[in-house]
Amino acid sequence: MRGGSPTPEDAAGGCAPLLAPTPDAWVEAALAHPAELLIDHANCEKKAASSALALMFTYPEDRPLVLALARLAREELRHFEQVAKVMTTLGVRFVRQRPGRYARELRAALRTCEPERKLDLLIASALIEARSAERFRLLAPRLSAPLAPLYVDLATAEARHFELYLGFARTVAPEAWHARLSELAALEAELATSPDRTLRFHSGPLAHSGCCAATINYK
Ligand SMILES: [Fe+2]
Ligand SMILES: [Fe+2]
């Protein structure tokens, strides 16, 4: 950290560019509500693949980006298959969940005009991947098989995806990416750390009146 305020380079638990670490309260809530989190995790993997495909359709002229995202989307769908297998093993059934605030409010902050929108989409994806990696790293030591080894692997994969998205953001806007990363990272940190009404994989810690439904135990 330089001076009094964190910068995107100040790792939150070693996971740049996060500006704030995940609160302990979120980790404890996640461990207390495993089914809720596992179902949302599966949805997150689907959304990660879907977002990559959407970028491929939006920016078909960017061949390096499109080819990198084709690989990434395949990898995210493989992650979904791995989570679905664990859910079967643990007896967790898919149910439709209400979306949390994290992606909705992060997306609402993205600019709508090009070329700014492309930069914002890449940075938002980078931040989501970075938060995923951080939370997999936090949860893995508290879990047992089959989730613990899967989360160790996923932490590595999502950290690599963060690097990929941020690399393209630098390429797209060599001058502007850093300042915009700081702005969006501040919003991301607020969404991931402030009390939330719904517990999700990227939510803040559950507020006292929040909702959750636990049906299984990890261990
Ligand atoms: Fe993934
Ligand atoms: Fe990812």
Image (tube, helix red, strand yellow):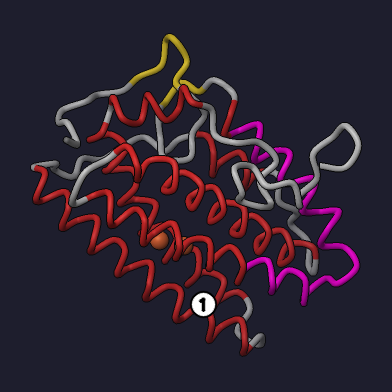
Q: Measured along the vertical axis of the image, is residue 217 above or below residue 78?
A: above
Q: Three-letter amino acid code at disc 1? A: Leu
Q: Measured along the vertical axis of the image, is residue 53 above or below residue 80?
A: below
- Which quarter of the figure is the C terminus placed in? top left
Q: Measured along the vertical axis of the image, is residue 91 above or below residue 33?
A: below
**What residue sits 19% from the left and 56% below the top?**
84
Residue range corresponding to the magenta coloring: 165-191
Q: Residue furthest front?
A: 141
- Which quarter of the figure is the N terminus placed in? top right
Q: How many marks?
A: 1
Q: In the rendered view, does 181 fall on the left or right side of 34?
A: right
Label 1 CB sits under 8 Å from any ligand 2 atom: no
Location of ligand 1 given as a quarter of the image: bottom left
**What residue sits 46% from the left and 22% below the top?**
25
Of the pair 88 and 134, the residue shown nearer to us: 134
Of the pair 9 and 185, the residue shown nearer to us: 9
Q: Is residue 189 part of the magenta span, yes or no?
A: yes
- Counting other residues with Cα less than 10 Å from the Cα at mark 1, is it few (<14), some (14-19), or many (20 or more)? many
Q: Is residue 47 part of the magenta span, yes or no?
A: no
Q: Where is residue 200, by image quadrant?
A: top left
**What residue sits 46% from the left and 81% below the top?**
70
The main secondary structure of the magenta stretch is helix
Q: Which residue is mark 1?
A: 69
- Residue 191, percent from left and from top: 60, 33
- Residue 95, percent from left and from top: 20, 40
Q: Measured along the vertical axis of the image, is residue 190 above or below residue 158?
A: above
- Residue 96, percent from left and from top: 26, 40
Q: In the rendered view, does 52 fall on the left or right side of 39?
A: right
**SS at circle 1:** helix
**What residue sits 15% from the left and 28% below the top?**
215
Q: Where is residue 155, by image quadrant?
A: bottom left
- Residue 74, percent from left and from top: 37, 76
